[in-house]
Image (cartoon, helix red, strand yellow):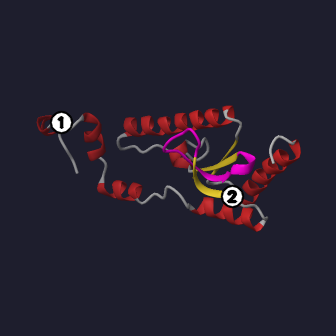
Amino acid sequence: METNDSTAEATGIPASLRRILETSPTTSARMSRQARRDTKPEIELRRRLHRLGYRYRVNYPLPGLPRRRADITFTGRHVVVFVDGCFWHGCPEHGTSPRNNGAWWAEKLRKNVDRDRETDAYLRDAGWTVLRIWEHEDPDVAAQRVVGVLTTERNSGDRT
């Protein structure tokens, strides 16, 4: 759907909505199909952790942070794991930015990264251990990172 400025202004459509309306139908459809949870990298990591005998909560609401959830949470050990998508969370290796509506997307993706850092800081200040894993990471290696943290947490005597 294409809009011109004079038509959009005459109809009272805010500038932020005009930028969204400029997105091509193909792009819009593709973005709307993006899974928010149970992505393939998440599922692969969860399978490996489960196979190793670990039990966890999935899509767990974060304490003190409304509308934010962790992909994998070990509540008793205060460990949260986020499996971040390269596009949405600004992967330094694979992150891209769409050409269409570039300024809007750059701001959107920057806000995602800022929110991630805010979430990490809040949880760490509250005594949680935070792990962030990129979607492109090998699930076996990622599972070993998680196990390493859980083993360290168990042996440190800080948590049960």
Splitting the image into 4 quarters, where does residue 89 fall?
A: top right
First-in-chain label (2 vs 1): 1
Relative to 133, 157 lies left or right: right
| Closer to the camera in the image, 103 or 89 | 89
Note whether 147 is above or below 3 in the view shown: below
User: Tag 1: Cα neighbours inside 10 Å, few (<14), some, or many (≥20)?
Assistant: few
Note whether 129 is above or below 139 in the view shown: above
Q: Which residue is rendered at x = 16% and y = 39% of the image?
A: 8
Q: Is residue 72 magenta?
A: yes
Region of the chain picked out in magenta, as a range: 62-78
Q: Is residue 45 magenta?
A: no
Relative to 60, 98 lies left or right: left
Q: Which residue is rendered at x = 35% and y = 59% of the image?
A: 29
Per the image, label 2 sits on a secondary structure element best described as loop
Splitting the image into 4 quarters, where does residue 10 fall?
A: top left
| Closer to the camera in the image, 109 or 78 | 78
Say which mark, if any, is on residue 5.
1
Say which mark, if any, is on residue 56.
2
Per the image, label 1 sits on a secondary structure element best described as helix
Distance (Cα) linking label 2 and label 1: 50 Å
Say which mark, if any, is on residue 68.
none
